[in-house]
Image: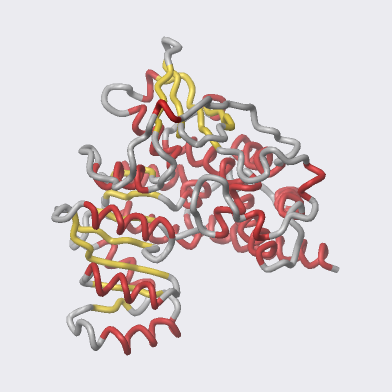
Amino acid sequence: MRNLAILGSTGSIGQSTLDVVKSNPGLFDIQLLAAKSNHPLLLEQIKFFRPNFIYLDDKNSLAKLKNEINTIDNTLEVLDCEQDLLDFISSSIIDTVVAAVVGIAGLNGVEAALSSGKRVLLANKESYVVAGEYLNRLCKENGGLIIPLDSEHSAIHQCLSRGNQKEKASRIILTGSGGPFLDKEKSDLVNVTMEEAINHPIWKMGKKISVDSSTLMNKGLELIEAKWLFESDTQEIEIIIHPEGIVHSLVEFKDNSIIAQMGNPDMKIPIAYGLGFPDRIFSNVGSLNLSELGPLTFLDPDFDKFPCLGLAKEAMMVGGTAPTLLNAANEVAVEAFLNQSIKYLDISKVISEVLERNEIKKVDNISSIKEVDSIARISADLIIKGLAA
């Protein structure tokens, strides 16, 4: 039985993870549920899964939750601060950490898990975007294991397992649906609303990642993440648009054969793969009916219509702190768009300006990454104020 800590249990990945756990009774013991502020949903999760520890980042929400859990389970231990959470992640109580916190806020948890040799199921792509080289080193030095939960990176992991070693691969091909605006002209994107941007045609996700998917920044971040997860040269990784979302990624080998991973577009499939690896467990997702699929489409990405993808590719090529600047600027810009402070097409303008205005440096450690992240956020805020003026 694996002892799990789920970071971000009330988010979409966290909820899907708990669905998979529920479908596989007796295989997992939920030791910790951690969330940001959604105390009503966390309370429901506590009632059903009976974790031994909980953490809620928002102190006002935590105070409300404490009053309610005392009537449910007085043996439940509440971790009061982030350091308590990080110490718990590093402890011998757990062996597997599901890292599903969105954004760079999830970096500390991933670092703590890998520093203590844990098995990390990684949904927090931003950690690997900004600190992939450092986290790889931590993983190797401490005997950890990283299994990606993004559908695309999970697909690559599956294509490279069971004898298909990375050194035999010549090309990694990341697929992407193209988002809700694939068939629109660039001129049609001027007045895009939040509701339109978060209405993904295939995947059910949170607002931030849905906007990233619409701008193709999500695919750009996955490009950088793949470089570090699979320790690949930048020229070995390509992106192809696949609107049907059935082929989740492909790997071409030195003999020019290609292995692809297919399945219904449901995050519970890669989550089940990660939780069960190297075994296979139930995902509770319907079987793929090949005879009903119809044609499968593959297209080159349009870098002109989706400039965020080009910015991400450029940041990957430059390296150093460029991906940190890119990620921070994107997080700030997307939040501003969701708050209706800027227009949709301003997202890429903010990111481009931040990359131009800030010096690219070598990545030394987590502290330097956080410093650059903070500088980039301040820079992005100033640019946004200028756009709104």
> Which residue shows up at 56% across the image and 28% down it?
238
Q: Is residue 375 visible?
A: no
Q: Is residue 116 above or below residue 295?
A: below
Q: In which image quadrant can residue 299 be found? A: top right
Q: Position of 383 compared to 230: left or right?
A: right
Q: In which image quadrant can residue 33 be found? A: bottom left
Q: Is residue 71 above or below residue 106?
A: below
Q: Is residue 46 above or below residue 165?
A: below
Q: How many marks?
A: 0
> Which residue shows up at 48% across the image and 27% down it?
172
Residue 369 image position (x, y, % from top left): 54, 55
> Which residue shows up at 58% across the image and 26% down it?
298
Determine the residue located farthest toward the front in the rendered image: 292
Q: Position of 24 compared to 316: left or right?
A: left
Q: Position of 228 compared to 26: left or right?
A: right
Q: Is residue 261 visible?
A: yes
Q: Is residue 307 above or below residue 8?
A: above
Residue 301 image position (x, y, % from top left): 65, 32
Q: Position of 33 compared to 207: left or right?
A: left
Residue 53 image position (x, y, % from top left): 25, 72
> In terms of depth relative to the viewer, which is nearer, 242 or 159?
242
